Amino acid sequence: MFTRTGRDFVVSGATRPVVTARAGRIRLRLLNATAGDHLLLAVTAVNAKSSRIHLIATDAGLIERPVPLTEILLAPGERAEILVATTTPGRLTLRVMPYSVYGDGGQQSTDRALAGIDIPADLAPIALPASLLPVEKLARPPPSAPAGSS
């Protein structure tokens, strides 16, 4: 859960916490609890290159299958769940990337670290699930008559 105290972002009550991965893939539940910040989030390695993440759930719950992304935008009050591969030893960083809700000419947020994920050696890879939740296909509604015709 991301909140703001002054200029700093707080993650679940802590400033820049570091957790240690215990499996080859971890699930992060993200909630933007700020009053007005749009957060463009990415997971980066030491070389600052964005890692591939997989979206698995949104405000509406689990989605049909994992969606590969390099970053995810959360508006205030929005939630998402992602999977992050944690098999390469080192540290990953959950970051807020520069973003402006006003487009190219608007004031951008600054790139800053939110949390760290330490990855010990020898974590076994965990396969990405092929599907998460079957989504029922809705029947196409019959065509309606144009307004004013009988």
Image (cartoon, rainbow, N blue to C red):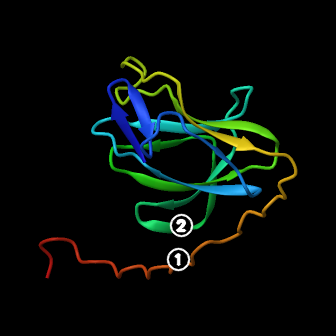
Q: Is 88 left or right of 65, judged from the image as shown?
A: right
Q: Mark 1 against mark 2, which lies toward the viewer? A: 2
State the SS at label 2.
Answer: strand
Picture disc at residue 31: none
Amino acid bearing label 2: Ile
The image shows residue 7 at horizontal and vertical percentages of 37, 23
Q: Is 111 left or right of 90, judged from the image as shown?
A: left
Q: Residue at x 71, y 68 (%)?
A: 129
| Count of numbered tags | 2
State the SS at label 1.
Answer: loop
Q: In the displayed structure, would residue 96 be above or below residue 89? A: above
- Residue labelled with disc 2: 63
Mark 2 surroundings within 10 Å by alpha-carbon count, few (fewer than 14), some (14 through 19), many (20 or more): some
Q: In the displayed structure, would residue 127 be above or below residue 148? A: above
The image shows residue 74 at horizontal and vertical percentages of 43, 44
Identify the image quadrant of the C terminus: bottom left
Q: Residue at x 66, y 56 (%)?
A: 26
Q: Is 45 left or right of 56, judged from the image as shown?
A: right
Q: Are marks 1 and 2 in contact (CB under 8 Å)?
A: yes
Picture disc at residue 135: 1
